Image: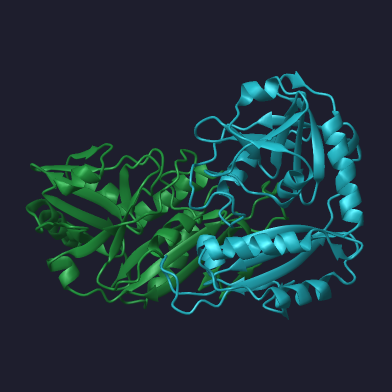
Chain colours: A cyan, B green
């Protein structure tokens, strides 16, 4: 792990990332030493850090540290955390903000192949996402909503939990964005009030027309295909959600294939 | 600073408090080596840790570490942080949770005396509190809403920002709970959808009848008295909020006096 360029595995207790979750993170697939969609991740980190009023990030420095860290990483997960750094007690940000950047490598999870070929089983979470336009879309360090939702089940046969918002709109999975297809059209939730705007979600918007709109559990029940995605798992079809079963459909397969091609050309 | 009983000022990067804000905190006034309302703080910490599905806290151990830390503290602020401890990447909690507890002492802030005698100036924040019954009321480590609200002003003449929720209900200050009096009755927001249930707020409920109900900025404009409170500042009257001015009223004065008496007898 690299903290501000130095090898260490601890952080100051007074770091605002620890005190308040005052920061952002990115989770990136590393394949054969190459971080996949690195520029998209850095761009999101840069945009969100502006929304959080952090000082301008030194992206070149990040690129160079990432390149060093990943040179022998093989297949791994790279996590970047950027916080508002150390600063006295209290919510007010310090006058001189010196952000903390933490880079860490983790083993790539060993997902069963049938998650990709046959799809996964998902459930609907009881915990609801709060509505907050100031923070929505960002991959910030305030993640208790996801933790409480993920704590609802222990059944290893269930791979993801679908989260609704306070108004019962379907938004995303605990760790993924969610799409569904109906009559050849693709749909996903708008994230103006809650949710995380994932990098793969953005990539899918570049591949085909997506209807970004409100929808509810009833719409999912009548969907032809459902899939979830994130930067580490890629795209998983949902083959079962509560009492409904789905086949892995044509749109999901096309996007899975296009994603493999895109990663291969990174 | 004490981390799990050991003197250190760092925390593991993989601590879920740093990774996700997965934990709770308490901020306690220490006066002449005595933590004020300590049992109430420990009780809230204990209740909220159960809501967060943390293992049962060892309150006796906490009491003994706090007593050791505070024996020469004089007047100070004691902060307790409890997190879900270390646990691999991902929102899912580890199977064996070993919480991290961090105790730290900080200088007691040197607030001008006239904040108590004459009251403070407050503003209304633009950032709104999200609605989330799963997390509302808890003093958890996900505090970006408060940080973004506190970042809205730099004017040293303004001491607090009042926060509304997504439905424009008045809830609290960025670091305080808020009460107002009208025709001899006291009012404060219900915290079933957002907000932090402060220890002083609870203490005030024990002193007199409080109407816990929804209210809006219009109600504040017509209030006879407004005050904000927390465990460190105590009770500050609001003498000015946006364009309205208020006098420091009888109910505020009575509560300030009763609070001093209560602290004296701790």
Q: Specify whether residue A151 is in view.
A: no
Quadrant for residue A251, please give it: top right
**Residue at the spot 39% in from the left edge and 63% down from the top edge:** B150
Q: Nearer the viewer, residue B75 or A192?
A: A192
**Residue at the spot 47% in from the left edge and 40% down from the top edge:** B132
Q: Position of residue B46 (x, y in %)?
A: 46, 49
Q: Specify whether residue A42 is in view.
A: yes
Above or below for B266 versus B70: above
Q: Position of residue A232 (x, y in %)?
A: 79, 51
The C terminus of chain B - image quarter: bottom left
Above or below for A225 versus A243: below
In-image side of B157 versus A165 (left or right): left
Q: Position of residue A254 (x, y in %)?
A: 87, 37
- Label count reads 0
Q: Nearer the viewer, residue B176 or A48?
A: A48
Q: Nearer the viewer, residue B166 or B10?
A: B166
Q: Position of residue A148 (x, y in %)?
A: 59, 42
In-image side of B241 versus A100 (left or right): left
């Amino acid at each position: 792990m690299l903290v501000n360029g130095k090898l260490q595995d601890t952080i100051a207790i007074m770091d605002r990332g620890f005190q308040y979750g005052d920061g952002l993170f990115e989770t990136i697939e590393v394949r054969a030493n190459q971080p996949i969609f690195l520029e998209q991740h850095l761009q999101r980190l840069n945009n969100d850090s502006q929304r959080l009023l952090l000082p301008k990030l030194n992206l070149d420095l990040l690129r160079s540290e990432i390149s060093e860290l990943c040179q022998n990483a093989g297949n791994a997960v790279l996590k970047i955390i950027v916080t508002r750094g150390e600063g006295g007690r209290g919510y007010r940000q310090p006058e001189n903000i010196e952000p903390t950047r933490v880079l860490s490598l983790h083993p790539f999870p060993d997902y069963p192949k049938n998650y990709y070929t046959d799809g996964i089983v998902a459930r609907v979470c009881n915990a609801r996402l709060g509505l907050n336009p100031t923070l929505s879309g960002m991959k910030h360090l305030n993640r208790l909503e996801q933790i409480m939702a993920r704590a609802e089940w222990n059944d290893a046969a269930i791979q993801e939990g679908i989260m609704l918002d306070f108004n019962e709109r379907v938004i995303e999975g605990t760790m993924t964005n969610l799409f569904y297809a109906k009559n050849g059209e693709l749909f996903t939730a708008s994230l103006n009030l809650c949710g995380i705007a994932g990098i793969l979600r953005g990539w899918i918007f570049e591949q085909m027309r997506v209807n970004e709109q409100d929808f509810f559990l009833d719409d999912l029940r009548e969907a032809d295909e459902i899939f979830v995605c994130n930067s580490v798992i890629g795209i998983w079809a949902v083959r079962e959600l509560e009492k409904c079963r789905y086949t892995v459909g044509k749109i999901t397969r096309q996007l899975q294939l296009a994603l493999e091609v895109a990663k291969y050309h990174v």
